[in-house]
């Protein structure tokens, strides 16, 4: 089975999860990158409004075409109760290329459920599995939750 992990990470928390999933599956990985920096208070506000309003943002061109992958695992931080605008843009650009999908998100404390539902609605495709991790879980139980996610994926894909 050919698997691709695609993620966006501003604070590196989502990257941490993506890297762990890639290690377990020994699969391809792609980081979605902004064209311009999101550092500073004004960029933080802009990012929040992009996410709330569901606006596209400018991202660097993908290096890996998701078409031809049996499963694309998409990861995002939660911004204002939904997916980050770079992942929103990536998914809008590529949703017709996805065969099967799985989603994961990282969040401060809440917003994961709405984020995962919004991702599903955006591409009109039910994920094989989903995973959400809070900041606290990333410190205390990351591997346990990721292993459960991986087990569920393996079960659903066989």
Image (spheres, rainbow, N blue to C red):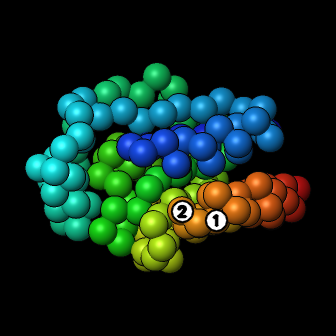
Residue furthest top in the image: 63
Residue 129 in the image: x percent, y percent? Answer: 68, 65
Which sits in the foreground, 149 or 96?
A: 149
Does 110 sit above or below residue 141?
below
Residue bearing the label numbered 2: 135
Residue 58 in the image: x percent, y percent? Answer: 22, 37
Which sits in the foreground, 127 or 41?
A: 41
Q: Which mark is residue 137?
A: 1
Which sits in the foreground, 52 or 154?
A: 52
Residues at marks 1 and 2 touching, judged by CB atoms closer than 8 Å: yes
Q: CA distance from mark 1 to mark 2?
A: 6 Å
From this viewpoint, is residue 125 visible? Answer: no
Residue at 54 percent across and 62 percent down: it is 135
Q: Secondary structure at mark 2?
A: helix
Does 52 sit above or below residue 110?
above
From this viewpoint, is residue 10 visible? Answer: yes
Residue 44 in the image: x percent, y percent? Answer: 21, 52
- In this rendering, position of residue 109 left or right of residue 143: left
Q: Which mark is residue 64?
A: none
């Amino acid at each position: 089975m050919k698997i691709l992990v695609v993620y966006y990470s501003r604070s590196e928390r989502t990257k941490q999860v993506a890297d762990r999933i890639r290690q377990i599956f020994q699969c391809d990985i792609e980081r979605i990158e902004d064209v311009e920096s999101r550092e500073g208070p004004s960029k933080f506000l802009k990012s929040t409004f992009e996410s709330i309003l569901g606006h596209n943002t400018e991202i660097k061109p993908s290096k890996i075409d998701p078409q031809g992958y049996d499963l694309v695992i998409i990861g995002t931080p939660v911004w204002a109760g939904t997916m980050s605008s770079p992942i929103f843009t990536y998914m809008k650009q590529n949703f017709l290329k996805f065969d099967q999908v799985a989603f994961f998100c990282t969040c401060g404390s809440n917003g994961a459920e709405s984020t995962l539902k919004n991702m599903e609605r955006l591409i009109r495709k039910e994920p094989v599995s989903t995973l959400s991790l809070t900041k606290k879980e990333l410190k205390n139980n990351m591997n346990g939750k990721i292993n459960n996610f991986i087990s569920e994926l393996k079960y659903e894909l066989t």
